[in-house]
Image (cartoon, rainbow, N blue to C red):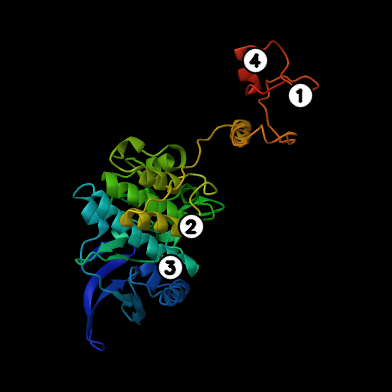
Amino acid sequence: MLGRGGMGEVYRDRDTRLQRDVALKLLPSSVAADHDSLARFTREAQLLGTLNHPHIASIYGVEESDSGAALVLELVEGPTLADRIAQGPIALDEAIAIGRQITEALEAAHEQGIIHRDLKPANIKLRPDGTVKVLDFGLAKTMLSPSTSGVGALDITASPTFTAHATAAGLILGTAAYMAPEQARGRAMDRRADIWAFGVVLFEMLTGVRPFGGETMSETLAAIIKDPPSWTALPRSVPAPVQALIRRTLEKDPRRRLRDIGDARLALEDLESGADTPAIAPVAAHAPAWRRAALWVIASLASVDLRRAWPRPVIRGDFSAPTHARFDDRGNCSGKRTSSTSRECGANFPE
């Protein structure tokens, strides 16, 4: 036996036909005994079998017998990333090299429309030659049914894959500590959930701890949904481009999150090569919309050479002012021009 988790037991085995060692994953009885679940799982395995990438562990086949069903997988030697993190934070250069290989695996899968859904250190193997292999790609989607979950007894530190009823909109699926907020809420998810999980993994490699804590699954999910990451845990030695990348991957609103894992790959490649390239820009703080718009206009005007811009162009824009602000019929802030009034109006705009 090589391991046991929410997705079954894994054994080292020998393929006597092709004379090679393989990893044999015995499927949980809830999947193997249910015809529909097994058929769905087989179709998913066939799709994943089309992935051929040096950083993705291959699926060789699905075997069925009277005693159950099993996946035949590529046997990847070496510890998991979880084993490595358990020894302490990983040096920056090593973490960047590992992270870059993870992004390559995710990018290849995303291009085929395949989402991992359960990316975590326990599903990442580190071979002795430095090669990183991502395991269990996309299998979480079809592994367990809500009726067989046992969520109350789960240990999130052991990171078993689980399902649990969440809302009428869907199911929580994955591992609590690495779930994206939308995944934790049971809402529809896409490849940006993998991008979030990658950010959690990168954070954990550099700090040795996860960005969202909690003694129970419920506390962990609540922290993911509401609390900011533990930014103070990041060492000051972590360069600004890496910090910016982590911040972009851990945006709670998926619309503000890094859009493509390929952008993370490019950033990490540049860091590995020492290229002098701009860092991934961090998302601006959540200021009110009217203030962000005002800052954008001011920045735009600052770049104009007014001596050459005569007659001045008319610049129009919509501003959502605070409800307590008062304006006259010309659009100017009414009342006495005091610092207090200026704050109420939102900014010191010219008359």
Which residue matches tag 4? 341
Horizontal arrangement in the rendering, residue 133 relative to residue 137 (left or right): left
Query: Disc 2 vs disc 3: Cβ atoms closer than 8 Å?
Result: no
Q: Please tell me which of labels 3 and 4 falls first in the chain.
A: 3
Q: Residue lying furthest front in this view?
A: 308
Q: Position of residue 229 (x, y in %)?
A: 39, 39
Q: Please tell me which of labels 1 and 3 falls first in the chain.
A: 3
Q: Position of residue 305 (x, y in %)?
A: 63, 35
Horizontal arrangement in the rendering, residue 152 relative to residue 78 (left or right): right
Query: Disc 2 vs disc 1: Cβ atoms closer than 8 Å?
Result: no
Which residue matches tag 3? 108
Q: Please tell me which of labels 2 and 1 falls first in the chain.
A: 2
C-alpha separation, residue under disc 2 versus residue under disc 3? 12 Å
Is residue 121 at all visible to an observer of this figure?
no
Camera-side residue of 48 and 343: 343
SS at badge 3: helix
SS at badge 4: helix
C-alpha separation, residue under disc 1 versus residue under disc 3? 53 Å
SS at badge 1: loop
Which amino acid, by three-letter code, is at mark 3?
Answer: Ala
